[in-house]
Image (cartoon, helix red, strand yellow):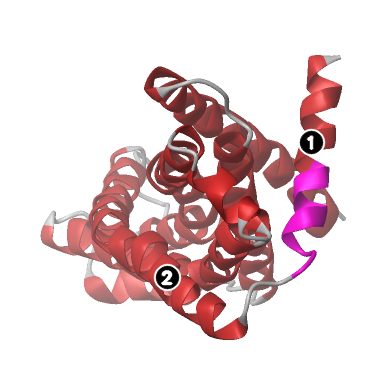
């Protein structure tokens, strides 16, 4: 019954988020603040992880190519496919669930503990629209983060492959262009948008409905990461089945 209650409270929260809206001038300021906190501040860790994971994918592919008949361009092909289809959109989103999700839950949870949310509601403000809607809008820019992740992942693979002596630059670039299907980019960005909605709403739900003190804020942040990760993985499976299976 607890799970049914949680699911119900989540969807009721979404209904209230898109209910009565806060003044446009106030929302505009909040949205820009959330873009800075959730998107721009995440770029360094995204860039660092993407570059080195792309390099690791290229090196592992090269080290597992024992047959001399297999062309070296396969290193570039495998790096591109791994980064575009799964690493950048899915696994980076799980990493962001830890960084962004915990930040959202702890910030809203702290407001709940210090009764700031109660103060907003006393003033007649739709607290859910005030707190959650700007985060949803800000994370609609999340695909731009994934574009950077894709580029740096492939670039990291090129650096590791070429300067590690595993392949030549021309072979790697040939592999990147080989059998490229533009529809795969649509698939990657479609699920990125779904993940961004999950990243914005699930941590907000955990923080908004938490009860207790500072200790419970930490527990809510942990639950936020678990729930967000599970939903990202589950939705990734469903979207893959719907968009890629023939």
Q: Is residue 21 above or below residue 160?
A: below
Residue 91 x %, y %: 48, 45
Quadrant in which the N terminus appears: top right
Residue 166 x %, y %: 21, 54
Q: What range is drawn magenta here?
A: 11-20
Location of mark 2 (residue)? 35
- Which of the two discs, 2 and 1, labels the residue nearer the N terminus? 1
SS assignment at label 1:
helix
Q: Residue at x 26, y 57 (%)?
A: 51
Location of mark 1 (residue)? 9
- Compare residues 122 and 205 and report the one nearer the observer: 122
Number of residues whose C-alpha sits closer than 10 Å to that of mark 2, classed few (under 14), some (14–19) or many (20 or more): many
Distance CA(mark 2)–CA(mark 1)? 26 Å
Q: Is residue 245 on the magenta stretch?
A: no
Residue 50 x %, y %: 32, 55
Image quadrant of residue 78?
bottom left
Magenta span: chief secondary structure: helix
Image quadrant of residue 192?
bottom right
């Amino acid at each position: 019954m607890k799970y049914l209650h949680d699911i119900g409270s989540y969807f009721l929260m979404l209904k209230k988020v898109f209910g009565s809206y806060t003044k446009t001038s106030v929302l505009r300021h909040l949205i820009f603040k959330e873009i800075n906190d959730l998107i721009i501040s995440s770029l360094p860790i995204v860039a660092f992880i993407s570059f080195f994971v792309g390099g690791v994918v290229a090196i592992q592919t090269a080290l597992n190519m024992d047959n001399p008949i297999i062309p070296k361009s396969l290193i570039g092909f495998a790096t591109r496919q791994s980064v575009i289809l799964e690493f950048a959109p899915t696994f980076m989103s799980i990493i962001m669930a830890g960084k962004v999700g915990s930040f959202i839950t702890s910030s809203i949870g702290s407001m709940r503990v210090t009764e700031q949310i109660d103060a907003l509601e006393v003033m007649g403000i739709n607290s859910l629209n005030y707190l959650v809607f700007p985060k949803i809008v800000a994370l609609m820019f999340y695909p731009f983060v994934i574009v950077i992740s894709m580029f740096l992942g492939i670039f990291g693979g090129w650096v590791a492959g070429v300067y590690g002596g595993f392949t030549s630059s021309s072979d790697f670039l040939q592999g990147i262009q080989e059998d490229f299907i533009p529809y795969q980019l649509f698939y990657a960005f479609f699920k990125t948008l779904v993940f961004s909605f999950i990243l914005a709403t699930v941590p907000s739900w955990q923080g908004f409905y938490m009860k207790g003190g500072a200790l419970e804020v930490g527990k809510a942040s942990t639950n936020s990461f678990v729930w967000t990760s599970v939903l990202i993985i589950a939705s990734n499976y469903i979207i893959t089945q719907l968009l890629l299976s023939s």
